Amino acid sequence: MLNKRGNKQEFDLAHPELIFLGGIVMGGLFRVMHWPHGNRIMAASLACFTVIYLIRFFRRKKKPFLLYLNIATLVVATVNGIMVIYYMKEHILFKYLSIGFGTFWLVLEGLEYYNNQKLKGKFSIFILFKNNVFTLAMIVTGLGVLFKIMHWPGGGVMLLAGMGTGAILALNSGSKK
């Protein structure tokens, strides 16, 4: 592949976990559309996503408390997600654990972010709509879910367009070009 200057362009996957994030989205699409293997796609993508983060965690030399909390939240939420995907009744404990860990992590992360003064002068309405295409894809997905639940025509097409676009953007956002 050549870039604008005619030089060979290398493809480097900087964030491989985003491939599995796209897989989670596509697995959800498969489940909602009642296509085969949606559960397997979601469970495998969720597990691989977590494994990548665990590898990065153990390779890191400096591990602050927030990183431990982040990993604990991710592991518990992954176990909960896989149990929910396969309709296991034991997921209630993991559900409450993931909510507790997640809330605690978000509060501490927010306090650290605020204490580092990274919020000064950065809030703008334009930041909220920075990724217009992704926002539009999520709106279309939400409408598709509503149409699908209400059994109105066009729900499947909207889900396919919205979730497909979101998955493509997730896959594309992890590569350096």
Image (cartoon, helix red, strand yellow):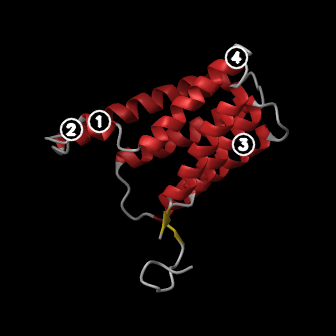
Calculate the distance from the C-alpha at mark 1 to the C-alpha at mark 2. Answer: 6 Å
State the SS at label 3: helix
Amino acid type, mark 3 = Ala
Q: What is the spatial separation of the Cα atoms under label 2 and label 3, in whole angstroms?
A: 35 Å
Looking at the rendered structure, the kind of residue marked 2 is: Tyr
Percent across and percent down for residue 114 are 20, 38
Mark 1: which amino acid? Gly
Quick one: label 2 or label 3, which is nearer the N terminus? 3
Local secondary structure at mark 1: helix
Q: Mark 4 falls on what kind of element?
A: helix
Residue holding disc 1: 110
Q: Real-space Cα distance between discs 3 and 4? A: 23 Å
Disc 3 or disc 4, which is closer to the eye? 4
Instruction: Find disc 2 in the rendering and name its residue.
Output: 114
Give the residue pinned by disc 3: 43
Residue type (three-letter) at the residue carrying disc 4? Ile
Mark 4 or 1, closer to the camera: 4
Toward the right, the furthest residue is 36
Give whichever of discs 4 and 1 has the lower sequence position: 1
Q: Mark 4 vs mark 2: which is more N-terminal?
A: 2
Q: Residues within 10 Å of mark 1 (few under 14, many from 20)?
A: few
Taking 92 as reference, is 156 above or below it?
A: below
Q: Residue beneath label 4, please?
A: 149
